[in-house]
Image (tube, rainbow, N blue to C red):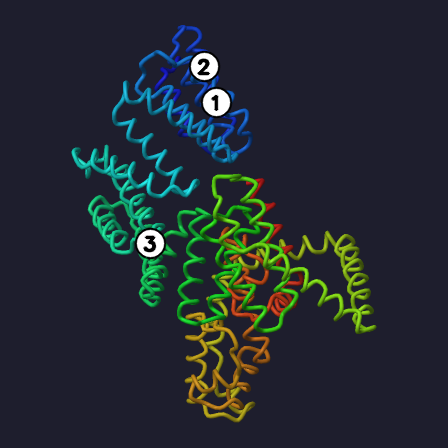
Amino acid sequence: MKLSFDELHNLYFDNDKNTAKQISYKDAYIAKAYKENNTVRKARGYYLTALLYYDSDMNKAIQYLDSVIKYSTGTNDRSFPVAAYCEKADFLKRQFKFEEAMINYKLAEKIALQTNINYYYVVRDFIAGTKSEDLGEYNEALNIYKECFRFYRTKNYRSKKYAKNYQYIIFGIANCYKSLKNIDSTTYYNKLGLQETKMTNNMTLHYYFVLNEGANQILRKNYKAALDSIYKAFPKINEYKYTGSSLSSYFYLGKAYEGLGQNKNAVKNYLKVDSVYSKTKDITKEFMDGYPYLISYYKSIGDKENQLKYISKYMAIDSVLQKKYRNLNTSLRNEYDIPRLMSEKENLIESLKEDKAKSFWGNGILFLGIVTVSAFGFYQFQHKKKYRSRFEKIMQETADKNFQEKENDTLKNSKTVAIKTDDIGINEELIEQILKKLNSFEKEKGFLKPNITIQSLSIVFETNTKYLSKIVNAYRNKSFIQYINDLRIDNALENLKKDSKLRKYTIQALALEFGFNSAESFSSAFYKKSGIKPAYFIKQIEESLKYK
């Protein structure tokens, strides 16, 4: 059966997760275009080819886009070569070739002005976005956004044809005003964006406006209002699986807590920013502010190792951004006072050297640590199969978790309390009350709060530590510390399986996420419960997903 161009086009996009099928459909599309000697269709076929290399080979994608431009130039098509110039510009931006990207946007702009006025304003939006987000030219970007805003206001801007483009323009204006610290104008356009997204049910963009206003409230120093907006937006934005959104959300949470003087919460969120960056190697100038805070914090508590760590990381990021952006962000180095940090870094290195030289045992411990790490590496190699077996067992156990929990609850409730009442010497009614509170504590995930002790939970339960300890021992068959740690690790196993964002965190950030005070205590509890380390568990999940 022969398929039309439109049918092949639709089948290509309907199979976006099946590359083999997409290749077969685009090949059929191109073959048909050559057979009919249809120049525009040849261009569209090569455009489909270029999209296949979007994440794997940018240079090859650009080559195919050049073919699109070659075949579609002069055809007066409403979409090409404008779309090809825009896609090429996007690839060039990802390679930090901003001048070349702008040249391609300008070529697209010139053609669209003659062939498709609606597309012309889409290209203008792309240009404004590049000037704002990449080049820091906020005033120029704002002028372009307002030009686009005036155009869309002459249209039916709540119709399906124009609504999304119009709302993205509003967001661009709000974002520029925020960067220029024009607080009132930012709030005005954020409110307009919230109104428009709600009217058209565009809830994806709706919560970006909520987050943006949260960031704006930080500029107003309304830190509690900022937290309210950010926490309202974050769960929704997190569903969209866009890494940049997580990074910005954590950053603004850090800024809000910093403003409130809640150092530990600020550090916790800045560490999550660093965790996301460590995985993606993607960060912009705006979100670097957390590193000076981490440096100052670790300096204030006398933690020279972490102080040195974040000075080094901060300077490395600065170097990368300076190299990538060359002369486009000339203010970056001056703002962050890198020469001062270089001096501080050298002093720290010397200080740490002196500390180690003073102690013979320091060198001995260092040597022992190297030997231990080497031995552990050998142990890991020797026991690879055993670890894999434990991983598979955990995956199976967590898959059956809901069923097992129901079974366990039934058994727990069916056991006569009276039998254990005699064993532990506590009134039956009191046992039932505390068990109900324990069940509620588990269901509401109270165990994720840091620094839980048997003393603090006894106060919450309105009982004493002796009774609580005995009941946990008798009815959970564990010591209190093991009980809390096992709940946290079970929660960690379940969430790491299903949440790809969590798997990008550092072990330190995961420790804080699941209620532990340090990476070491989290890793230790994780290993005791599962028999494997968290890093190994995360790695195996990621590898197993590659083959699905």
Q: Earlier in the sequence, mark 2 or mark 3?
A: 2
Residue sitting at 26 percent across and 27 percent down?
Answer: 118
- The residue singled out by tag 1 in the image is 49
**Which numbered mark, 2 or 3, is in the foreground of this view?**
3
Residue sitting at 36 percent across and 59 percent down?
Answer: 230
Q: Residue 231: x and y, percent?
A: 36, 61
Residue 136 versus residue 509 in the image, above or below = above
Q: Residues within 10 Å of mark 3 (few under 14, many from 20)?
A: some
Q: Earlier in the sequence, mark 1 or mark 2?
A: 2
Residue 175 versus residue 433 in the image, above or below = above
Label 3 SS: loop
**Which numbered mark, 1 or 3, is in the foreground of this view?**
3
The answer to which image quadrant residue 71 occupies is top left
- The alpha-carbon separation of the residues under discs 1 and 2 comes to 9 Å
Label 2 SS: helix
- The alpha-carbon separation of the residues under discs 1 and 3 comes to 43 Å
Mark sitting on residue 128 = none
Residue 419 versus residue 184 in the image, above or below = below
Of residues 409 and 156, the one drawn nearer to the viewer in this rendering = 156
Residue 371 versus residue 282 in the image, above or below = below
- The residue singled out by tag 2 in the image is 30
**Which part of the image, by quadrant, shows the C terminus?**
top right
Q: Which amino acid, mark 1?
A: Thr
Question: Pointers 1 and 2 in contact (CB under 8 A)?
Answer: yes
Mark sitting on residue 181 = 3
Q: Residues within 10 Å of mark 1 (few under 14, many from 20)?
A: many
Q: Residue 208: x and y, percent?
A: 33, 50
Q: Residue 389: x and y, percent?
A: 67, 54
Q: Residues within 10 Å of mark 2 (few under 14, many from 20)?
A: many
Residue sitting at 52 percent across and 34 percent down?
Answer: 95
